[in-house]
Image (tube, rainbow, N blue to C red):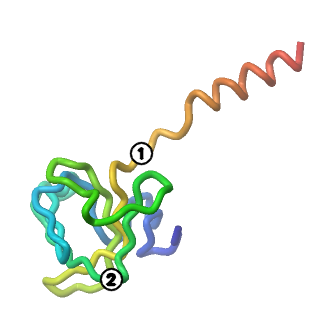
Amino acid sequence: MNGGPNGMMGGGQFGRGGLGTVTAVTDSSITIKDQRQDEETSYAITADTSVMDDSDDAAVSDIKVGDTVMIQSDDSESDTKTATTIRLNPSFGGRMQNAESSSSSSTESNI
């Protein structure tokens, strides 16, 4: 992941792009209702756009209206934004089960 100012981790936000619910999707574009801006935003999909579902490769055909996606886009300030990466059903919570297991393991080993 790019941690620069326009990267997905830049400034504690997602950088360029959006997070929201898919309202329309075709082979060449995706439109989402952006949760941060509370407006619909459209992005072009190209042959260079990567689609991920969790950590697995996915295809544009896997994306359905109503899905939650996180989109990283190019740095374009124009009206036409191009999706560089689309993450289908992104999760942000981490792995609580593993953290609890590690915690209880370390507690047991300290007894």
In which quarter of the view is residue 12 placed? bottom left
User: Which of the numbered marks, if any, corresponds to residue 91?
Assistant: 1
- Kindly identify the residue that appears in the image at 23 percent across and 85 percent down: 77
Q: Is mark 2 on a helix, strand or loop?
A: loop
On the image, the x and y values in percent for residue 86 come to 34, 65
On the image, the x and y values in percent for residue 4 come to 50, 74
In which quarter of the view is residue 88 placed? bottom left
User: Which of the numbered marks, if any, corresponds to residue 33?
Assistant: none
Residue type at numbered disc 2:
Ala
Tally of marks: 2
On the image, the x and y values in percent for residue 30 come to 18, 68
Q: Is residue 106 above or below residue 23?
A: above
- Kindly identify the residue that appears in the image at 37 percent across and 66 percent down: 51
Q: Quadrant of the C terminus?
A: top right
Q: Is mark 1 on a helix, strand or loop?
A: loop
- Relative to 80, 46 lies left or right: right
Determine the CA span between mark 2 and mark 1. Answer: 25 Å
On the image, the x and y values in percent for residue 31 come to 14, 65
Residue type at numbered disc 1:
Ser
Local packing at callout 2 (Cα closer than 10 Å; few below 14, some 14-19, many 20+) is few
Q: In this view, does 1 lie above or below 36?
A: below
User: Label 2, on which residue?
Assistant: 47
- Nearer to us: label 2 or label 1: 2
